[in-house]
Image: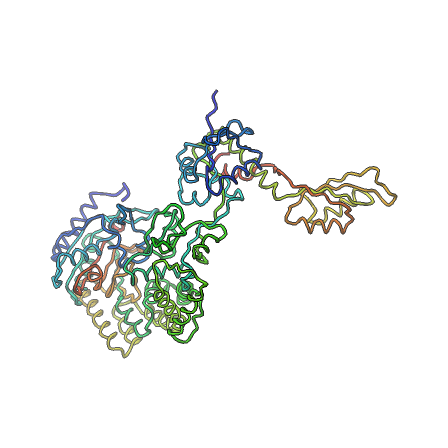
Amino acid sequence: MPPSVDYRLLRHISNQLDQHMTGYGYQPFDTPVIQPTDLFLTRAGDQIAKRLFTFERDGKSFALRPEFTASAAYSYAQLYPDGGAVVRWQFDGFIFVDYPAGAQQRTSIGAELFGLDSANADAEMIQMAAGGLALIGVQGWRIDIGHIGLLRALLAPFRLDARTERFILHHLAALSNLSQGRAFVLEHLDRLLHAPAEVDLTTPTPADVERTLDAVLESGHYGVTMGGRDRSDIARRLIQKRQRFTERAQVSAALELLEGVSGVDPHPERAFDQLRALTDGDSAIGALLERWQMVIDQVIEAGTTPDRIAIRPALARDWEYYTGVVFEMKASDDAHLGGGGRYDELVKLLGGQHDTPAVGFVYHMDALMEALR
Amino acid sequence: MTLPQITLALPSKGAIADPTLSFLQDCGLRVEKPNPRQYTGTLPALPGIEVLFQRVNDVVYKVSDGTVQFGITGLDVVREHPHPDLIVMQPDLRYGHCRLVVAVPESWIDVVTTADLAEVALDFRDFKRRNMRVATKYPMLTRQYFHSWGLHHFTLVNAEGAIEAAPTIGYADVIVDLAQTGTTLRENHLKALTDGVIVESQACLIGNRGALRERPVLEAARLLLERMDGALTGREYSQLSVNMRGESAETIAQRVAQNPLTHGLKGPTIAPVFGADDGDGGWFTVGITIPTKTLLPAVEYLRSIGAAQVIVVPVRYLFLEHSPSFARLCAQIDTP
């Protein structure tokens, strides 16, 4: 933080927020600042991976923690190897972002709730986050609420390659940006995923691809050096590439659907009817929408007025580990005050043996302080 | 008054060591090296400047920390070790050309571009449970380049020398290394990615920002750059003496100057040739200086307007009113 920070105010609002979350039953929790790099790269979005502070010691790569969630999930997996435990943790500490033009060390305050998968848990987290803003006196705050799980469910019928799906989810912001839109995303996708290959990819079947590959590699034209890959790795990827050639129409249709979904009226009383109309008939999606609406209803019931809530189905967060409801808190000038969401797969990805539902959020304290000026 | 010692660091070995000495010789700055085993030398043409031989990386370090004021090294090394006090005074001395490229085994026929490689890196994690290993002497540039392509899952393997062999020996999957013609890559069964050029490199002249704020150092920089610019610009021009028949110097001048190919720097100089008058108009000698790359079309044109002999001499130096590189340098260090 810059030296101009009002540390008395920072301490004051930190205490207020800590007490606020203690009132919800959240226990203090901390993680080591220095951790193996892989812990953070497991599901980091590209923006995060690029800005991770890393260094090497004795051939191992370490990173300064860029956030709390991955470390918390890892700790949960270590502390509760049998799973099942319901744990409420709150944290307050420094995080580090290798960002030359801005503050590299930032204060981050937030909470994680492990072991509960319900609309109540989602609503608890959003309500606690929003309640904190009201408590410390931020004026004109709003909260954007999206749903990554819904987007994944919408994409499922298109049977896209995992990488293509990942790419699309990464470019949601561009999709709802009027000056970019679908054509922009498709163009990028073509450039990134549909690169040319040295062999003909228009062959009719995967088996043909393998046959072609064998013929090419045995022609003696290429050396025997393979790096760390073998023939089956190359064949698998050629088949993947071939598949992408054939799925472009699917991608375009998927983007069209997402574009429509991201264009719904953000008002919580109108958004859900429009979303149902756009996705009518699908029972799985209907169930997701119903639960999502329950979360919103509970948040409103608990005291957040609907005019502070915007339903944004295509809301994307920097971290790739989110699986359900996601949300972002904003100041009246659109500054990001913090955000969070549900991440049900992370504990298992970090070594947990059991499926562990989880939801959490974080305040960006430098932005909060700015908003309180 | 004692002059501050000004030192120019030159590469002691490697691909650009010998070409640097011949380049300086072309600039009229022959390097005197009294003892081949010593690390110092002199520039007889510029007695105020001492020469120190260092490895290409050390040239960059020593200029950055101000131990020496000037250095000649490869642009690749300069980009790998950026430093706020390091100024590139002349980015292209037109020798030592090479490219820093990403190269993969040529058997990876599914990999053509960097985007492909980014996917393969994910495959390594998904299917091999490890990072793709990259052997390189350029960790900074490699990291920067890969991250800019969204390629985040890789491990750098530091290696010195014979990097091209790493994928065959097995301690790396891909390499980032210098390539001049691509022959070494091919011999090691590697291929460069089609869009994987990280730096186009050649020899360059660098200087220390703080040192350049001192008058004597800036003056030394001017003398170096004047000679380099003179030689580099001169190399692109040829001087022509043309024997041509015509009614008068004016008519010949008009014909020669009206074509941009033969206009020369300012226009032709024309002198009569004595004793060659065979009664059919006079003979004149035309002098012009023109770009070498359009020499042949220019000669064609001169023939068409009556040239009998064309003598072409390479230009050794061409000094303009001011050294353009020195003007750029002054702008970089905010000196009038």
Tell which of B3 and A95 is nearer to you.
Answer: B3
Residue B333 visible to the viewer: no
Q: Position of residue B116 (x, y in %)?
A: 39, 61
Where residue A291 sits, quadrant-wise, is: bottom left
Determine the residue positioned at 33% across, 74% down.
A158
Q: Residue furthest bottom?
A: A281
Tell me: B76 left or right of A61: right
Q: How many marks?
A: 0
Residue A25 visible to the viewer: yes
Tell which of B197 and B288 is nearer to you.
Answer: B197
Tell which of A257 and B53 is nearer to you.
Answer: B53
Determine the residue positioned at 19% across, 69% down.
A294
Q: Residue furthest right?
A: B279
In the rendered view, tell whether residue B268 sits above or below residue A257.
Answer: above
Tell which of A176 and A207 is nearer to you.
Answer: A207
Q: Position of residue A15 (x, y in %)?
A: 16, 48
Q: Position of residue A100 (x, y in %)?
A: 34, 46
Tell me: B273 left or right of B8: right
In the rendered view, tell whether residue B161 sits above or below residue A243.
Answer: above
Type of colouring? rainbow
Q: Position of residue A205 (x, y in %)?
A: 39, 75
Where residue A199 sits, quadrant-wise, is: bottom left
In the rendered view, tell whether residue B315 sits above or below residue A117.
Answer: above
